[in-house]
Amino acid sequence: MKKMIHGAGGGGGKGGGSTHTPTEAPNTLSTNAVVTLVDLLGEGEIEGLVNGAQSVYFDDTPLQNADGSYNFEGVTLKSNNGTPSQDYLPGFAESASEEAFNVKVTHEQPVIRTVGRQETNELRVKIGLDALTEYANNGDINGSSVHIRMYLNNVLVVNHEITGKTTSKLEQTFIIKISPGYYIADIETSDVVLDNLDEYFSWKRAGAHAITNNYYKPTHFTYPYTLKVERVTEDSDSSRVQNTVYLTSITDVIDTKLSYPNSAVVGLEFSAAQFGNQLPKRSYLIRGLKIQVPSNYDPSTRVYSGIWDGSFKTEYSNNPAWVFYDLLTNQRYGAGNYLVESDVDKWELYSIAQYCDELVPDGRGGKQPRFCCNLAINNQNQALNMITQLTSIFRGMAYDAAGTIQFSQDRPREPSMLITQTDVVNGQFDYQTSSIKELHSVCVVAFRNPDLNYSIDQEVVEDASRLARLGERRLEITAVGCTSRSQAMRQGLWALQSEAQSDMISYKATQDHIHSLPSDIVKIFDPNMDQEEGAAGVITAVTDNVVTLDREVSLSSQNTLMIFSAEQGIEEYTVIGAPGSRRLEIDRTIIADVGTRWVLYHATPPKQWRITAITEEDDGTYTVNAIAHDPDKYQKIDEERALGVSKENTAIPSLKAPSNYRVEQSVSYHGGIAEAVLIVAFDGDPNAAYYEYQVRSNDGNYSDVKTTHLNHIEFSSTGATYTFRVRAMGWFGQRSHYSTYHCSASLEQQIPQNVSRFVSSYSDKIAVLEWAKNPELYVKHYEIRHGTAWENSILIAELDSTTLHLTHARPGFYLIKAVSQWGIKSAEASVLELTDLTPLNIIQEYNYAANDWPGEFDHTAVNNNNHIRLFSYYSWGGMAQPWDDYSDSWENTKSGTLATDISAGYYLSAVYDLGKTMRCRVYADMQISQSNDDLSWDNMQQAWEHYTLENNWSWLGSPEACGFEVQFSTSSDSESWSEFMPLTASFSHFRYAKFKVILTRFDAQYTPELQELSCTFDVPETVYNVDNFPVSAASSTYVFPEPMQQKVIVIATIQSGAAGDQVQVNKSLTQATVNIFDKDGTAKTGEVDLYIGGH
């Protein structure tokens, strides 16, 4: 039997006289290489993964997101936490050895190899192809097939035909089971269900990509193993067919069932196709080793209950004191072979651990433990070096004292001794002050930042006063095991604060220092260094609240007596009186022995010092070294402080995965082949520096990781289904998880949807048509027409935008359809109606000729034709009218004076009143003619048909024979008038107007005539624009904010209406009432935009 992998093939055809555009079938085959590996996390037993699959990262991307979705498909995850008796990982209990061959397999020459070992349980044979395609005669690129067989020890084990299409390198793996007695030729072997026991078995893998597989009945193979791979398909000698087969490699697998005791391991199995056939970097977020912690301690709550009896239990903890203890005492990976429990001062570690667990502000409004230790020790190191690193986490140190390892920690504690000159050999204190050059103003702390996938980050801490005084002087330190920005900040503050107490002191003391230890705090009174008067000595007598000193003292207004004894420690008393020069009365009864040390001070108490080292000398004295101590520094370090306050401490934001994917598709042509150009856009994160993405087609391999700085991905395709996965990458190395998006590139010729939201508006008397963008990927442009029906309408525009401006819009219906890449239009046109825009301009007009030329005349007269004519000569040649027109005078006139030798005259109009003063523009429309006064036969040079009664037996002479000019004068009160000026089409502010038309004769034979004079006054309009005015089925009325004076125009445009909708408007000078009707004349509700103009 054969196992078939079916893929889509491409085909072409031909028809009478038609042309064919070559096409390429989509890729249908993909590499099926499966990666199986076991990662060693470290020593066991550990607590384990923090949150299951969400704590497993491939290339810094979590396997599973917080919402339960997965960034990677088909990943098998198993883990063991490292107990001594743990079981093996199911599915990962094997060892494998791969041998590469890369040998070409031909029909004539099979490949034969000796493989495996005596213990071999399974062979994985990897077959490779450079491509699998076939070029048709019409140019189409289709899939192809190749048939292969494999024989193990001359037994047929694989009989398989690879069918489909791929243009890139392809690898497929075939698994041959050798033991326990059956084999399976398939990609995967999980979830096998046996259907029958005839000649062969069959099984089906369920899921989104189900494949039915067949393999032969059980066969037992004996070592040695010989594998033969043969190509059944004939070798191709044509460049049109690409199906070359290679034996890429053979992997020998032995089922070992390794359990890896005391080792924390994670087993992973996944398809290499998801990572572009590259092995991804893996990382894991875990809670680490279970260690020895006090029996009365709850590591999850960090609470110590009751009194500790010194016993331990095993639990996970990241308290650095107990991590340190575990490293000192563990015999497998620590120093336990060299130390026993009694060698370590666990009681002091108990105090240190409690200080570590105290909650302090985290800089974000919450609380966190003061110190945590989160680190992986993955290489050998000197024990002393590791001790130094680990103790630095809790500001401590370790030292040997009397054969045991003792610990100290810089933490708040009460002074243990009071030291005066009488307690020091020779009364001598030696001081040393550090140079100002050794001070730093900035501390840069390196730590592991969880927001950056635990990569190294820096926290910058500044001392503002030192920065102003010294400038920037950097101290760089590493916060070992630190994964908290706030803890790193406290570490930097501690380093700068400690530098501030850099003064050192040394002295030699006697046996009273026998119990002193490093980190002990002592108070030292040195009169040689004290800034004020004070005294010290021993007590000689005590009676109730009266103390007798060994010397006389002087008192001030404020006095404090400090005494020290080994039994009572340091106590302070307020001096309230002085019965004598050596006797002091204090505020309460004192219990002290004779010889007890005392110090009397006024305002400044003895300075505190922290012992850093104490050495026993041969003479029984002790050399003590100490450093200045500020008891207030701990509060300064731990107090609430917002993160990111310095110029370099910008809080690093976490990144959100891309979302809200959209896809646009267009078509381009390359070499005559149509390609779908996909633009996949998404909403990114504003804090992202760029984006990484991978693409795969038809469930094939993911591409190599690519980057883009834009919020979209653009690529070409010949048609397929695609899966994108994209993640945001930050400026500081932080990254989001992947988000995935599926889409298809299609070249199918589909009908676009009807255009929606086709509406209009007016902008400065320009009609603006707008519509919604069609959602289809293949819409190329929009076609807009004018008319009542699409079939007989007139094309207005074709454009790919969604806005059209019409400067001179015709009234009537406008129709629009979307047009696809292939010229296919929407099924129905969307329609809107525009009202005539001409009436939108409010004007006043006056025709002087129609009103019998009211006004005054100068050397002009109105003739029988109602034309104003400049007087002409008395001559036969000047008698240009028909004989019947001459009656009372030889001059054809109705009014005026008989002419003499006149070269110019004018007509002065009557006054026109606008009704009120306003700013408007004035136009004059005139008809002027000139006639020849000498109608002798010699002057009649035109064709005979030109001379008719209609043109008064005359003809117009040359343009230079006569002239005219229109002048204009205005007034606001009809009393004061402006000078007459030539009329221009400009704005003027007036109420009254009059016109003067001057007629001029340049040639004595010709006379000018003013036939028509009409003046237009373009007055300002009052305009109201009302958008989205709701209209009920019963009609709705809009009342104007102010009534109109003379004229009103209302234009109503339906918004988002249906085809055939009409609007009706009834108007007055005060309001407009609107109705909407559908195509059947039924009233309906809706919305309109109103444009209201008036005067």
Image: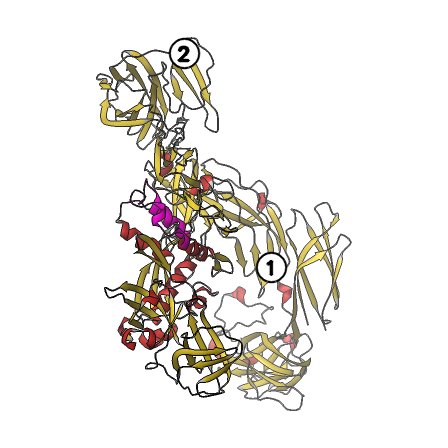
Element on which disc 1 rests: strand
- The picture quadrant where one finds residue 687 is bottom left
- The picture quadrant where one finds residue 1037 is bottom right
Question: Would you place residue 463 above or below residue 805 in this image?
Answer: below
Is 280 a magenta residue?
no
Residue lying at the far right in this picture: please name it. 1034
The three-letter amino acid code for the residue at tag 2 is Tyr
The answer to which of 389 and 490 lies nearer the viewer is 389
Q: Which residue does the image show at 27% across and 11% down from the upper left? A: 154
The answer to which of 832 and 942 lies nearer the viewer is 832
Residue 890 seen in this snapshot? no
Using the numbered discs, state the Cα–Cα distance from disc 2 to disc 1 in whole angstroms. Answer: 75 Å
In the rendered structure, which disc, 2 or 1, sits on the residue that comes first in sequence? 2
Task: Quadrant for the C terminus, please.
Answer: bottom right
Question: Would you place residue 220 above or below residue 692 in this image?
Answer: above
The residue tagged 2 is 200
Question: Would you place residue 81 above or below residue 299 in this image?
Answer: above
The answer to which of 965 and 72 lies nearer the viewer is 72
The residue tagged 1 is 761
Q: Which residue does the image show at 44% across and 85% down from the upper left? A: 582
Task: Quadrant for the N terminus, please.
Answer: top left
Q: Which stretch is magenta? A: 319-347
Residue lying at the far bottom in this picture: please name it. 976
Q: Which residue does the image show at 45% across and 18% down from the upper left? A: 203
